[in-house]
Amino acid sequence: MRKINRRDFLKATAVLSAASALTACGGSASSSTAASSAAASSTAASAEAADTFEEDVLNWKPDQKTITIRVANAAGGQADLVQRLVAKQIQSVTGTTAVVQNITGSSGFLMATDLNSYDPSPCELMLGTEALFAIAPLFNADINISLDDYVALYGSDGTTAPSALAVPATLGVNTWEEFLEYAKSNRIIVASNTPGGLTHLQATALMGAAGIEFTSVTDSGGNKNVLACLNGDANCVMVNTSVLHDYVDSGKMIPLLQYNPTEFTGWDLAPIPSVKDAGYDIALEGCSILCCRKGADPVGVEAMSRIIVDYLNSEQGIQDMAEINSTSKVLDADSAYNRLKNEVATMKRLYETYYKK
């Protein structure tokens, strides 16, 4: 069965529309016939091109001995584990060795620098995030990187595990409103990741929007930041809900607000209100994309995209993701790219409004 991609379909439709418009505007019989003939020829050519592209995608084979997926997170983390599943599937389908390479530091810029040392290729990939495309260049003027220079293969929806502000149960605070009262007469110390990290920016924006003065205790690990709260080094923490879950489930921590634009119900515990519900225009949806450099072979990009998305949406893929406790939703390449672009713009606004003072 012939598959025509969206671009070819729109192109063919545009040609037919032009021919119809010419006839409607009083074009002669001969000109109308010529336009119709041209439209038919163009449609046939587009269909033929789509057939060729489809065949090329189905027959595509990697032109390298190794496919590399770069991740800016340490081995064993959620992002790393998901990409190891992806690499395993790519290797199974293509017969080519696929590996995950962990390159941490500078919010992913070291990872991107490594990728950029290779020619554009669907075999040379990295997991791009808001931290890389927004936070890294905001906190370091020497970092020059743009989402426009990369092509997405697929994306992950970050709303399944947003960042949340939580307090230790021993603080005696159970809601955001109670926290606001607490902050009026107590020094607020927020645990988050280091300056230039996502949760540090989010903590700064939330406290700034609420008009709360605070100091920071920072560490690169989410669990370490929660422990800073439990040990008394901080009285609240901004951390991913995937890290927070077990502490809340055990009754040690209480979540107050989270960064999704709507109430978070994506776990088996009580819902968490949104920062938007509290009246703050700082919500983020969250997104990451597996991408390659712009200029990579479009046939290979499409082939790799299909391998990954088909697997992650399959029964086996869903089961494999559940086994590593991942609830991330799969986004197609265009949706993921557009969402990440919006997130980058929002983060720049938060930085300019609450951080850059």
Image (cartoon, rainbow, N blue to C red):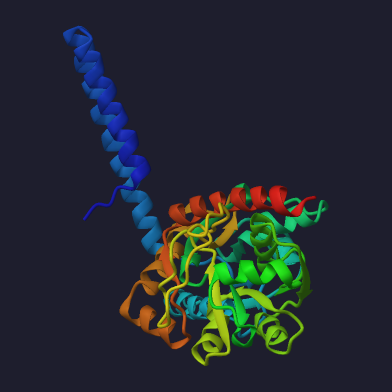
**Position of 122 compared to 113: left or right?**
left
Q: Which residue occupies the foreground of this view, 150 or 325?
A: 325
Q: How many labels does the image show?
A: 0
**Position of 2 compared to 110: left or right?**
left
Q: Would residue 299 be seen by someone viewing this image from the given angle?
A: no
Q: Which residue occupies the foreground of this view, 56 or 242?
A: 242
User: Residue at image x 35%, y 50%?
Assistant: 52
Residue 268, x across and y down, in percent: 40, 83
Query: Which picture quadrant has residue 283?
Result: bottom right
**Position of 203 compared to 292: left or right?**
right
User: Residue at image x 50%, y 66%?
Assistant: 158
Residue that lies at the very extreme toward the bottom in this rendered image: 250
Residue 251, x across and y down, in percent: 53, 90
Q: Would residue 190 be seen by someone viewing this image from the given angle?
A: yes
Residue 101, x across and y down, in percent: 65, 76
Question: On screen, 62 above or below 57?
Answer: below
Residue that lies at the very extreme toward the left in this rendered image: 29
**Position of 328 compared to 198: left or right?**
left
Residue 314, x across and y down, in percent: 33, 75
Query: Which picture quadrant has residue 318?
Result: bottom left
- Image quadrant occupied by the N terminus: bottom left
Question: On screen, 251 above or below 201?
Answer: below
Question: On screen, 238 above or below 211?
Answer: below
